[in-house]
Amino acid sequence: MNHHMEVRCTSLVGLLGQSHDPDMLCPNVVIARDYISASDNLQVLDFIRIQVTDGEVSFHAAHQVLQLVTELFQKTAIDEVLEALGWFMVVDADAFVARDVTQLRIIREPARIALVHDDLVYFLAVQLFLTRIRNWADIGHNPTIHCRLKLWNTWIWDGFIDANVTLDHFNRVWEMITGWFGISKPWRYVVNNRTVNPSWPLQGFVTQEQYGGDELKIYLLLGTHGGGPPQSFDLRSASQVRTSDNADTLISRHGHSRVP
């Protein structure tokens, strides 16, 4: 998207439909797509070897397992966002004909403006993290505390937790996923304007909701930078783009993965 950066976009909504903060400038990039709130336990990735090299990310496994990986990317719309970011999935043509594909590659699309490689890897890790935690409804044996997690400008999880739950429950998943990609980007967890050790029980940080219940709001920040990424991304549905007052300034590009 290319427009004047001082324009404030009061009609924008975020990934989960929340209103754009009127005190914030319009994001640098708006990606329009039909949002699929799919979740998955990511167990299929236990049978995958992920390799990150200069200029690509590749997934190595048996043919049937890679089929499940492509299905995961399609049901979570990761393949569509990859396309919008200038990357796409490819497989060897001969292996595809022989139905013996053992490598799925994500490479940069030629002659396209694309997200840089390091940010692409980080994007994949974040998307898989969101996909995994969406699979959780409530956490713990006695989930009575209303808990919400916010990443940048988006509430990414909303449910109930037990008083003895710690942030290790989320942190272990994030460390597992970043380990697959060989990156180190620890979260800094902030509750009530305080950085919280992931191993601390969360019951000591609970506040009262407006209607009397227990509430806990947790903010995820990058540990080394204290904030979000250098470029701002806002994912919206196609229908939200069409009904926006700023629709004429938004560019939506929809494509299909090279992998069937």
Image: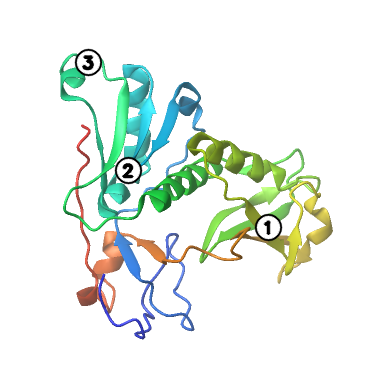
Residue found at x 20% / y 76%: 248
Q: Which mark is residue 189?
A: 1
Residue 215 visible? The answer is yes
Q: Which mark is residue 162?
A: none
Amino acid at dot 3: Arg
Comes first in the chain, label 1 or label 3: 3
Quadrant (top left/top right/bottom left/bottom right) for the N terminus? bottom left
Coordinates of residue 205 in the picture (x, y in percent)? 79, 60
For residue 207, above or below residue 159: below
Disc 1 packing (10 Å; few <14; some 14–19; many ≥20): many
Picture quadrant where residue 33 is located: bottom left
Indicate which label's residue lies in the foreground, 2 or 3: 2
Quadrant (top left/top right/bottom left/bottom right) for the C terminus? top left
Indicate which label's residue lies in the foreground, 2 or 1: 2
- Residue occupied by mark 2: 55
Residue 213 visible? The answer is no
Return the residue found at the far front.
54
- Residue occupied by mark 3: 99
Coordinates of residue 40 in the picture (x, y in percent)? 48, 36
Asked which secondary structure carries label 1, the reply is: strand
Picture quadrant where residue 51 is located: top left
Q: Are marks 1 and 3 in contact (CB under 8 Å)?
A: no
Coordinates of residue 212 in the picture (x, y in percent)? 76, 67
Asked which secondary structure carries label 2, the reply is: loop
Q: Is residue 226 found left or right of 87 in the rendered image?
A: right
Asked which secondary structure carries label 3, the reply is: loop
Towards the viewer: 162 or 82: 82
Disc 2 packing (10 Å; few <14; some 14–19; many ≥20): few
Towards the viewer: 243 or 219: 219
Residue found at x 49% / y 32%: 42
